[in-house]
Amino acid sequence: MNREDLKNFNRLPQSYWLASTAPTEYPSLGEDISVDIAIIGAGMAGLLCAYLLHRENVSIAVLDAGRILCGTTGHTTAKITSQHGLIYDKMKRQLGTELAKQYADANEKAIKQIKEIIDRHHIDCDYSPQSSYIYTEDENKIEKIEDEIKTASELGIKASFTDRIPFPLSIKAGIMFDGQAQFHPRKFLLRLAEIISTAGVKIYENSRAVDLEYGEKITVTAGNGKKVTADKVVIASHYPFYNKQGMYFSRLYTERAYILAVAAKEKYPGGMYINAENPSRSLRVLDTENGQLILVVGENHKTGQGTDMAEHYRNLVDFADKLFTVEEISYRWSTQDCMTLDGIPYIGFYKQNTPNILLATGFQKWGMTNSMAAANIIRDLIIEGTSPWQDVYNPSRMNILGSAKNFIVENADVAKHLISGKTAPLPEDVKVEPGEGKVFENDGERTGAYRDEQGRLFLVNTTCTHMGCELNWNSAERSWDCPCHGSRFTYTGDIIDGPAVSPLTAENDVNTVEKLIKDEF
């Protein structure tokens, strides 16, 4: 992809991880089955859970809404690091040393464990040891950098101060974490999927879980009506699809970020880098068959919010031009992450009174090590009944009423989107050009329209089928995105990202927040 292609968006985004690996062909769920453990979601967290659990003499089924490893795992930056921004000193001050130590230990062990799995199975996945850096260009953050180094070191992490990085940036202070790494996530996990499938784990693709019934055993219903009955269920579907308990819709929000893979004249100096301020900027290298590519990452914003999404890619191009002599933009793509209100993932029992349903979500853009940590915690809770890291990640650490209060503070912009809409025909005076998407109203009815390059017009009901928020057009990805909880749909109305489990059709009327809260209590 050359620079003119990027500027004009003549091509749809494409992830390097997906482009450089073959597609999978696991079957769909075609009959009712019964297993010991059902895992919903076949991203990194789900497959690592299956990998650790399959050695415990239990039967396992893994269901994915689409093809495995094509969601967030297929669109990550793939840094295997315990450096998750400036978190450790904040965590120590707010939660205490013991819980901060749990988080540090879980992620430090995850780094080592991923390497152990790679070595044990001789997986060729472009694994490369790297140091990880966080830096600031703001002198007001120097003290925070120094405090972070002190706390991280106390927690057992190899952290040291630096005042320079090998790029033309005037940094004021920085932190280097030793013993970190990077890899190709799909090469690693596709091989892992083969290993567990050969060992008897049942993997089902294109089998979206749409309902869960909790009783003596748990029944998961897929979109085609087929059912999986299990003793225990692990929800690792990125955003939880199950909304009837836990009120996770009030405790999670989603953010998008953007990635360029650029070829540059200069040789990349090594290391993984991220800044401590906004807008976010992150760098790492890819060694490909066609030479080095540099990942230039950043520009986060809440899903479905904003006007010109393509501007985020252009901002990254400008940043790359300041650091490198960019010769080609080979790939570009975006990613979506679940964020928690306190910055720590939810891993453990879905709710205190549902010991047979477990959850892993809210990885805060740090899904590589947190997915491994999640697999360890969930394996321990199921097999041993306890985990040394369960307290810091406990999903029930925030009560429902407190969570709802924070939901109002953190998501005050959600309520304005909770209005209904129905599909209306395109009025004669509304023009939609090829490649353009827009929302129009006709007699009070709100409809989304997109015209493809061949001139075909696609109309959708712009009401999200998850909880009734109004969708916005994403020009960069050509998708309809929900500004409330992050569901995304194609221009034909099919689901790209949950938590929605139903496509955009006139029949799919909205669920309301009031009903969900009524179900909760």
Image (cartoon, grey):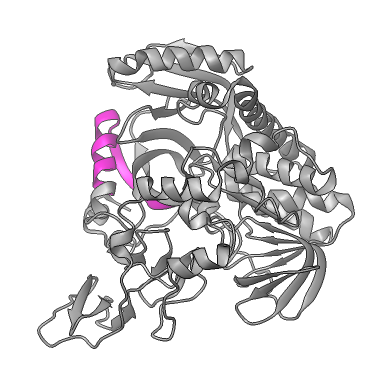
Can residue 426 be seen in the rendering of this structure? yes
Instruction: Indicate left or right for 415 with 505 as reference.
Output: left
**Is 329 a magenta residue?**
yes
Position of the C terminus, as image quadrant, is: bottom right
Image x and y of residue 239, in percent? 53, 57
Q: Residue at x 79, y 75 (%)?
A: 33
**Is 228 a magenta residue?**
no
The residue closer to the viewer here, 204 or 344, is: 344
Q: Residue at x 69, y 30 (%)?
A: 109
Using the image, determine if residue 104 lies above or below residue 507.
Answer: above
Can residue 336 be seen in the rendering of this structure? no
Pick out the residue farthest to the right: 57
Using the image, determine if residue 392 lies above or below residue 63.
Answer: above
Q: Residue at x 48, y 25 (%)?
A: 271
Using the image, determine if residue 519 lies above or below residue 334.
Answer: below
Image x and y of residue 344, in percent? 54, 38
Q: Residue at x 27, y 80 (%)?
A: 454
Image x and y of residue 154, in percent? 60, 13
Residue 171, by quadrant, is: top left
Image x and y of residue 455, in percent? 24, 82
Residue 134, by quadrant, is: top left
Instruction: Indicate left or right for 199 with 225 as reference.
Output: right
| Region rendered in magenta | 313-336
